[in-house]
Image (spheres, helix red, strand yellow):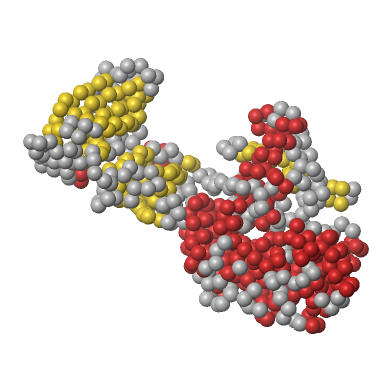
Amino acid sequence: MAQRALLLVVLLWQPVMAVAQWGGLEPARHAMDRGDWSDAVRLLIAHLTREDVAIEARYLRGIALAETGKYRTLQSRVRNTLQTAARDFELILEHDSLYRDVLYQYGRLRWFAGDLRSAIRLAEAQVRLKPDLAHARLGLHQFYWRYIMQTDPAHARDWLRAHPSALARLYTGETYTRQSLYQAAEGIFTGLLGRQHVDVPARIALARLYFAQGLPERGTAEMDQANAAIMSEADALLMFDTIKTIVTTKERSEFEAISSTQDYRLFFTVFWARRDPMPAAPYNARMEEHFRRLRVAERYHLFQGFRTWYRNQFTADATHFSSTYTLASDFDDQGIIFLRHGDPDDYTIGEANSWLYEEALLVFHFAPTCVGHICGVSRHFVPVPRGRSWGAQEVGHDWVEAERKSGDYLVEGLTTDRHQWPDGTTQLDVPMVTASFAGLGEETLVEVHYVIPENELRKGLDDRVNTVHVETGMTVHDQDWQRMGLFRQTKHLTGPYIGSFHLDLPPEPYHIGLHVRSLQTRHIGALRFEYDPRSYRGSGFKMSDLLLADSIMDLRGEDTMAREDVIVSVNVTGSFDVSAPVYVYFELYDLALAPDGMYRYSVDYSIRPENGREDAVTVDAGEQQSHAASLIEYVGIDIRDVATGRYQLVVAVHDRHGGTVVQRTRPLTVVR
């Protein structure tokens, strides 16, 4: 059901194909499935000649004629085509006003003819008669949205007030939002909360309003509540409509396969979790940026027409365009790229505009195309720059290579999206290190240690400010993006600080997000990375990861495994001055028991240069023994005679009775 409704919205007719089969109409349906509207019309005309009152044939022909007539190139032909389609729909309504979604299809026809007010009235009649038609409810919202986008806000309000309905009230609020009259808009939206069929769109409208006001925490919370309020396929389609411009083909397929409200809610939760650059923060920064881009695109990149592929051979090559491209048909091509990738890092202005995204190495060229006096999509894709551009690496050595590169860029650019921090944001470098140890039961203890760059944070503060206020946070998601843990802290610092987060987890791969955010300035450090912790399950000798430290203080009694009593001052950067030793901490588990009741092992330490020369330091600790099968080990290694440079610390442990040798490494840098 979800797939059927979504494809109708995007391809504008597809519910036809999901109904029971009527004899004699299959060739026309197949033509419509291919998008060959003219052939479908020809086949349906032949069918109607034989059976003039065939309701289904007229229904199909009305849709096919509407599709052929929506392109405004030859006005008289368009008018005649749309008039014929209108007669088909009116004949159906005379026989059966409840026939399928004929009122909604007639509304779409009125939209194609440029009469959105009539389109709204017809779609509203459709949802009154058949409240469960999810695609008609979504289409009705889209008609309202197009109407307020194309109409002066004051004039739109006059008509909306004279057309009383909950949705007219909702979009009256949207006209106020467009004019930044936020208080009036908020009063309307909050008054619609909890009402059937309007609760979800009202919450989305509130979220957009809060993001526009610079209130990202309230905006995120409202979107979360909108997601929790999804009770139907129509609600889910409305939520999908807010993100359709940035979905991947895989996400689109996943959405179309959903059949339960619970799975719809999970889909949107995962969608935003995948993209959030600092998921432990109290707001979703990617969501905030998405709605900022929507506001900009609605102002500068709206496209009110209908796309055709006559423009040039390059844009007619469907291999360049993913199936999600048509989802953003309300925006020109420049707007589609802007919504996915944000403001370009560099651009050119001339006969054609070119945009460069340096980090992803993506280049796009845009220009209007006209055939005679008739122009197609403004700012659409063209294969090569026109005028000044960048070098061969970005654009290509010649016209042939430029077109090939442009095709590759399109394939990449239309299937991905990226986050951008707001203007004025200073991105922080946050050094961090992860390590795995045996945890509770059969779980693994994951430790993440990080440095808060307090000196960098002070650069944005007045010299008289003594305390730096900062938020730190970490989240852990499993491979299905279910959250396994969230930590968030506020720190008030007067000097350097090394923080850490600890969590016991099943030993499987995770998505980890870590951030440091100033609460006084616009400094943000955010990291996202994959981490697969070691497993310490089962029998046999095992060894933890290594932690490098500036100092270690041991408060334990002899032969106890009390990790909390060993204070490890972790060196997160791995950089050590020759004047101080390198401390290394690790743990051993499940040594083999010797016949005399003791556990024996030996440890070798070596510091190896990256260039492969012989070891700078080698320490053989000799054979040791313990009364415990699992124990804590640490040592300080003198590096006063080590030359500056980059090295690997290698620790090899030999279980003397079991015969097993386990080795761990950690990079380090020696400085002077």
Q: Quadrant of the C terminus?
A: top left
Q: Residue at x 74, y 29 (%)?
A: 398
Q: Is residue 83 above or below residue 609?
A: below
Foreground: 228 or 612? 612
Q: Is residue 483 above or below residue 672?
A: below
Picture quadrant of residue 174? bottom right
Residue 645 at x, y percent in the picture: 37, 21
Left or right: residue 268 versus residue 643 is right
Give x and y (percent) for residue 62.
Answer: 81, 70
Query: Extreme left residue here?
Result: 596
**Extreme-front residue of the structure:** 23
Going by the picture, which residue comes out furthest to the bottom?
Answer: 95
Vertical side of 587 occupied by 298: above or below: below
Nearest the viewer among 613 and 61 is 61
Using the rendered image of the protein, determine whether residue 375 is visible from the camera's viewpoint: yes
Is residue 497 shown to the viewer in this render? Answer: no
Which quadrant would the N terminus be assigned to in this image? bottom right
Residue at the image point whose x is 14% and y is 38% from the top: 593
Quadrant location of residue 366?
Answer: top right
Residue 18 sits in quarter:
bottom right
Q: Is residue 80 left or right of residue 496?
A: right
Q: Nearer the viewer, residue 55 or 513?
A: 55
Q: Residue at x 87, y 66 (%)?
A: 81
Q: Residue 308 in the image: state x and y as whole percent.
A: 79, 53
Count of numbered marks: 0
Q: Position of residue 67 (x, y in %)?
A: 79, 63
Q: Which residue is found at the position 26% from the left and 37% from the top?
A: 543
Q: Is residue 522 left or right of residue 121?
A: left
From the viewer's perspective, tell me whether residue 224 is left or right of residue 69.
left
